Image: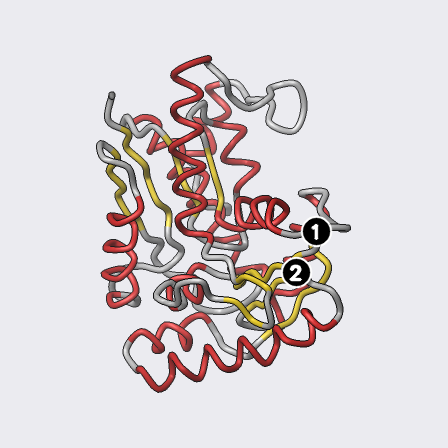
Amino acid sequence: MKPIRIWYQSYVDYENGKTYWDRLRKHLDDVVEPGTTIDIKGITPHDSYAHAIVEFRCAREVICNAVRAEREGYDAFVIGHFQDAGLYEARSVVDIPVLALGESSMLHGCQLGQRSGIITINPRYIPWFHHQITKYGLERRVAGTHAMTFEPGQILKAYESEALAREVEELFAEQARPLVAKGVEVLIPGGGIPMLLFAALRNHAIDGAPVINGIPIVVKVAEMAVKLRRLTGLGVSRAGEFVKPPAEIIEEFMTHPKLG
């Protein structure tokens, strides 16, 4: 089998998320198939504050990195950030598969239960998630969104403290139980950081509702997308949402990163 190379785009850089990256690298190595290699890439300044303007800033770099990944011979580009900022735009400028943690987690949740719920790390992400849910056409399947109260940089500290990791787990469960009581059947941590934090909890469930770890899900979807493209040439539609701009327009975007 021809090897598969995947660019895994984190919205945290190594300097600010060393323990997280080290654990993520091991987790990714454990879930990939033989012959698949994954390179984690970061963003500097990293996504340290829960706000749409930060997502917008990061999205531009992600779109450029998707182009770089294709030019450097990667077979797929994975957005390892639940907010999926830049996803649709990245799909519109490259021909390699572009997968994202949030979208893949929500779609897989639809196969595990009729209604999913998301527990994010910060209430300021809730409006962003509502936009995502609507964009993916999942308003009837993703039935609720609750939040803890961490900034991205704060929750990273849970990787350095067993006590804080347990606290995050307990706070997640506190937000999850009311969702399950209202009929949610699948629980999705709204971020790669809490997903990886809970990855060691095999068969993790709260009141019977499974808790999704979307990291292996998005990796397996990426591997499948590469294989299907090799087998059949299958790729995204260029008839509408992901119509590809001319090469000179992509180059303009790549070479003019700042306004003013």
Amino acid on which disc 1 is placed? Gln
- Decide: marks 1, 2 in contact (CB < 8 A)? yes
Q: CA distance from mark 1 to mark 2?
A: 7 Å
Drawn side of residue 95 relative to residue 71, left or right: right
- Secondary structure under the numbered disc 2 in the rendered image: loop
Residue drawn at point x = 25 percent, y = 68 percent? 19
Residue placed furthest toward the bottom: 163
Which circle marks residue 185 in the picture?
2
Q: Position of residue 249 (x, y in %)?
A: 51, 24
Q: Position of residue 10 (x, y in %)?
A: 37, 53
The N terminus is located in which quarter?
top left
Instruction: Classify 144 as above or below 72.
Output: below
Task: Judge by depth and name the residue closer to the eye, 137 or 127.
Answer: 137
Q: Position of residue 58 (x, y in %)?
A: 46, 52
Packing grade of label 2 (10 A; few <14, some 14-19, many >=20) is many
Place residue 185 in its image quadrant: bottom right
- Secondary structure under the numbered disc 1 in the rendered image: loop
According to the image, label 1 marks what residue? 114
Residue drawn at point x = 45 percent, y = 57 percent? 213
Q: Position of residue 64 (x, y in %)?
A: 41, 38
Amino acid on which disc 2 is placed? Glu
Which circle marks residue 164 in the picture?
none
Task: Judge by depth and name the residue closer to the eye, 171 or 205.
Answer: 205
Task: Judge by depth and name the residue closer to the eye, 177 or 62.
Answer: 177
Residue drawn at point x = 41 percent, y = 51 percent? 215
Q: Answer with mark 1 or mark 2, whichever residue precedes in sequence.
A: 1
